[in-house]
Amino acid sequence: MASVERPLNEVVFLTVAEVASVMRVSKMTVYRLVHSGHLPAIRVGRSFRVPEQAVHEYLRESYVGVESA
């Protein structure tokens, strides 16, 4: 999915703990998604920051809908 580039001062970055809370998964799951490349992140010192929009896009793309027959 092509995302619209936003100026960095408009991007909201989330910590791994915040991403885990939004996704309702463990922090280790978020680290796995980041290291596997499924969830983009930037490194700040020894921490990672994930763009909030990337979390929403990941969840949207991962959504499993129920198809009616």
Image (cartoon, helix red, strand yellow):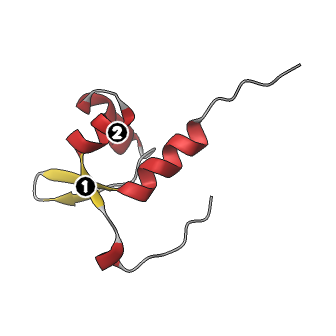
The residue carrying mark 2 is 22
Residue type highlighted by circle 2: Val
Q: Which mark is residue 49?
A: 1
| Residue 31 image point, x, y percent | 28, 37
Q: Which mark is residue 35?
A: none
Q: Quadrant of residue 34?
A: top left
Q: Residue at x 25, y 55 (%)?
A: 49
| Residue 26 image point, x, y percent | 27, 27
The quadrant of the image that shows the C terminus is: top right
Q: Residue at x 42, y 48 (%)?
A: 55
Question: Which of the pair 58/68 is nearer the observer?
Answer: 68
Examine the rendered structure and indicate whether residue 62 appears above or below residue 46.
above
Furthest residue in direction right, as rendered: 69
* Inter-mark Cα distance, 1 to 2: 14 Å
Q: Secondary structure at mark 2?
A: helix
Furthest residue in direction front, as rendered: 68
| Residue 11 image point, x, y percent | 34, 69
Residue type highlighted by circle 1: Arg
Q: Quadrant of residue 29?
A: top left
Q: Residue at x 26, y 53 (%)?
A: 14
Question: Which of the pair 10/8 is nearer the observer?
Answer: 10
Q: Secondary structure at mark 1?
A: strand
